[in-house]
C-alpha cells in the first residue's frame, strides 16, 4: 500500500513555523508572502508570538487578550522565540512571548489566557448598520508581493486612501485567501489587517508603522468554529493624529453579528 500523501497545510500555517529549540525556546523564520513595505506584516508577528505560547504543553485556557510591542525592524535572518509563564492561576494565566533576531529582541507580547465558563452574557456593541453581504461586493485585488495578496477583501464603506477625507472610518469584509478556518492566531492577525488610518486622512503617502497593538479576544472556541472560513467584518477608525503618532481602534465581527475581537493600536508616522 502506498504511503499516505502528507497533509498540505494552509499558507497561513506554513508561514508560522515553530521548531523546538530547548525548554520554552523555538526556532522560526520569515515568510515573504506576509511581507509589508520593509518587513513582515505586524499581524504575522502577532500571530507567531501567540502561537508560541499556545504551543507550550502546560498552557491553560484560551486567549482573552494580548499586547504586542513591535520594537525593531525585521529582516530575513533566522528567528527565535522564547516564552515564559509570568503567572499561572486557576482562572487566568499571564505569559510573555519574545521574538529575537540577530541576538536582539525585535517584538514582545504579553498574552493573557483565561478559563472560559458559562456566565451572564450580552452584547452592548452593535453590529454596523446597512452592511452589504460580501457576495454582493466585488473583491479588492491584493497587491502582489505583499501580505494583502494572502487575504480576500471586499470593502463595504469608507473613503478611498490617499485622499484628504473627513474621517478614517472603513468597513471591510475579509478572510484568508484559502478560506482557512478561523482560530486565535488568525484572529490576532486579522486584528491588524486594516491599513494605517493616516492613509485615509492625508493625500501624501507617508511612512507609517504600528508601535504597540492590543487585541481582546471575545470569541469563544465554539464561535470561532461557527465562523469557519467565512468572511469577518473589520471596522476601524482613528481618534487623533498628533506629533508623529496616531491611534486606531477596530472591531471584528462574524457575519451573524457576534463580536469576535476588538483592537487598539498606537502607530508612528512621518
Image: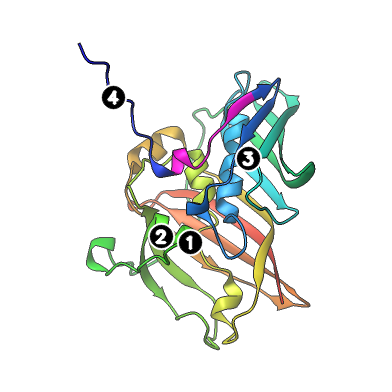
Asked which secondary structure carries label 1, the reply is: loop
Residue found at x 48% / y 61%: 146
Q: Which residue lies furthest to the top in this view?
A: 1
Figure quadrant of the N terminus:
top left
Mark 2 to mark 4 CA distance (whole Å)? 28 Å
Q: Report crowding for label 1: few under 14, some 14 to 19, many 20 or more residues within 10 A (C-alpha).
A: some
- The structure residue drawn at horizontal position 47% and vertical position 64%, both measured from the top left corner, is 235
Contact (Cβ within 8 Å) of mark 3 with mark 4:
no
Q: Residue 146 carries which label?
A: 1
Give whichever of discs 3 and 1 has the lower sequence position: 3
Give percent across and percent down for residue 246: 69, 71
How far apart are the alpha carbons under marks 2 and 1?
A: 6 Å
Residue designated by label 3 = 49
Instruction: Measure the alpha-carbon separation of dots 2 and 3.
Output: 22 Å
At horizontal 33% and vertical 25% (from top left) the residue drawn is 6
Q: Where is residue 120 in the image (x, y as percent from the top left)?
A: 51, 36
Image vertical order of residue 7 relative to residue 240, above or below: above
- Check the image and report above or below for 268 versus 260: below
Which span of residues is magenta-colored?
12-20
Q: Which of 29 and 193 is in front in this view?
A: 29
Q: Is residue 15 magenta?
A: yes
* Cα separation between marks 3 and 1: 20 Å
The answer to which of 251 and 194 lies nearer the viewer is: 194
Q: Pointer 4: what residue?
A: 5
Mark 2 or 3: in front is: 2
Residue ID at (37%, 69%): 155
Amino acid at each position: 500500500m502506498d504511503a499516505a500523501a502528507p497533509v498540505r497545510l494552509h499558507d497561513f500555517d506554513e508561514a508560522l513555523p515553530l521548531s523546538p529549540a530547548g525548554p520554552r525556546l523555538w526556532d522560526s523564520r520569515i515568510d515573504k508572502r506576509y511581507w509589508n513595505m520593509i518587513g513582515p506584516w505586524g499581524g504575522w508577528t502577532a500571530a507567531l508570538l501567540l502561537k508560541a505560547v499556545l504551543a507550550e504543553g502546560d498552557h491553560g485556557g484560551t486567549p482573552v487578550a494580548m499586547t504586542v510591542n513591535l520594537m525593531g525592524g525585521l529582516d530575513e535572518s533566522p528567528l527565535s522565540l522564547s516564552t515564559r509563564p509570568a503567572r499561572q492561576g486557576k482562572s487566568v494565566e499571564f505569559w510573555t512571548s519574545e521574538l529575537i533576531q540577530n541576538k536582539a529582541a525585535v517584538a514582545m507580547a504579553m498574552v493573557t489566557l483565561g478559563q472560559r465558563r458559562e456566565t451572564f452574557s450580552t452584547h452592548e456593541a452593535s453590529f454596523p448598520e446597512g452592511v452589504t453581504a460580501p457576495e454582493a461586493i466585488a473583491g479588492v485585488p491584493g497587491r502582489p508581493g505583499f501580505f494583502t495578496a494572502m487575504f480576500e477583501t471586499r470593502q463595504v464603506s469608507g473613503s478611498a486612501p490617499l485622499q484628504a477625507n473627513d474621517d478614517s472610518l472603513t468597513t471591510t469584509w475579509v478572510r484568508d485567501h484559502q478560506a482557512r478556518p478561523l482560530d486565535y492566531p488568525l484572529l490576532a492577525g486579522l486584528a491588524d489587517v486594516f491599513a494605517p488610518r493616516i492613509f485615509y486622512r492625508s493625500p501624501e503617502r507617508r511612512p507609517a508603522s504600528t508601535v504597540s497593538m492590543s487585541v481582546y479576544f471575545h470569541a469563544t472556541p465554539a464561535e470561532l468554529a461557527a465562523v469557519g472560513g467565512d468572511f469577518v467584518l473589520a471596522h476601524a477608525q482613528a481618534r487623533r493624529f498628533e506629533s508623529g503618532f496616531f491611534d486606531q481602534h477596530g472591531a471584528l465581527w462574524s457575519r451573524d453579528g457576534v463580536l469576535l475581537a476588538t483592537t487598539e493600536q498606537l502607530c508612528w508616522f512621518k
